[in-house]
Image: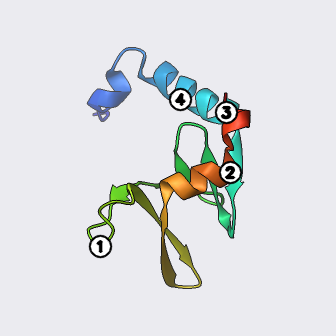
Amino acid sequence: MTPKPSIMARAKGYGRLADLRRHEEREQDWRDVPAFPEYEVNANRQVRRKTTKAPSHPYRYMMRPNDGEQVDFWINGQRHVISLDQIMSIAWPKEESE
């Protein structure tokens, strides 16, 4: 008896959707995050680690409620909390993004 494929494998068009997402990811322009060379950011405010392409999700930091969204960067086992607005203003200056 052969095993049945999973629901996701049987879903019509699932493979094409995954291929489309990979293509869109390649097409986006990613720039290095200043002072954190292991990370990069795109114009859509997405942050990821370069080596693994793992996303770093922005969040609201309770100790800095007026600073907007924050992102964690891990360098040599130390956590650094940086404002996403700061990262965007340096990596994507206003005159370039318009």
Judged from the image, the secondary structure of the residue bearing numbered disc 3 is helix
> Front-most of 28 and 82?
82
Residue matched to label 3: 97
Numbered label attached to residue 63: 1
* Residue lying at 68% horizontally and 30% vertically, measured from the top left: 27
Judged from the image, the secondary structure of the residue bearing numbered disc 2 is helix
Kind of residue indicated by mark 1: Met
Q: Of the residues tagged 4 and 3, which is closer to the observer?
A: 3
Kind of residue indicated by mark 4: Arg
Q: Position of residue 7 (x, y in %)?
A: 27, 28
Q: Where is residue 4 in the image (x, y as percent from the top left)?
A: 29, 31
Looking at marks 1 and 3 on the same chain, the residue that comes earlier in the sequence is marked by 1
Does residue 16 sit above or below 94 in this rendering? above
Residue matched to label 4: 21
Q: Are marks 4 and 3 in contact (CB under 8 Å)?
A: no
Looking at marks 3 and 2 on the same chain, the residue that comes earlier in the sequence is marked by 2
Q: Of the residues tagged 2 and 4, which is closer to the observer?
A: 2
Looking at marks 2 and 4 on the same chain, the residue that comes earlier in the sequence is marked by 4
* Cα distance in 3D space between marks 3 and 2: 10 Å
Q: Of the residues tagged 4 and 1, which is closer to the observer?
A: 1
* Cα distance in 3D space between marks 4 and 1: 35 Å
* Cα distance in 3D space between marks 1 and 3: 30 Å
* Residue lying at 66% horizontally and 66% vertically, measured from the top left: 38
Q: Residues within 10 Å of mark 1 (few under 14, many from 20)?
A: few
Q: Position of residue 24 (x, y in %)?
A: 60, 28
Question: Left of 64 or right of it: where is 13?
Answer: right
Residue matched to label 2: 91
Does residue 49 sit above or below 80 in this rendering? above
Does residue 58 sit above or below 75 in this rendering? above
Looking at marks 4 and 1 on the same chain, the residue that comes earlier in the sequence is marked by 4
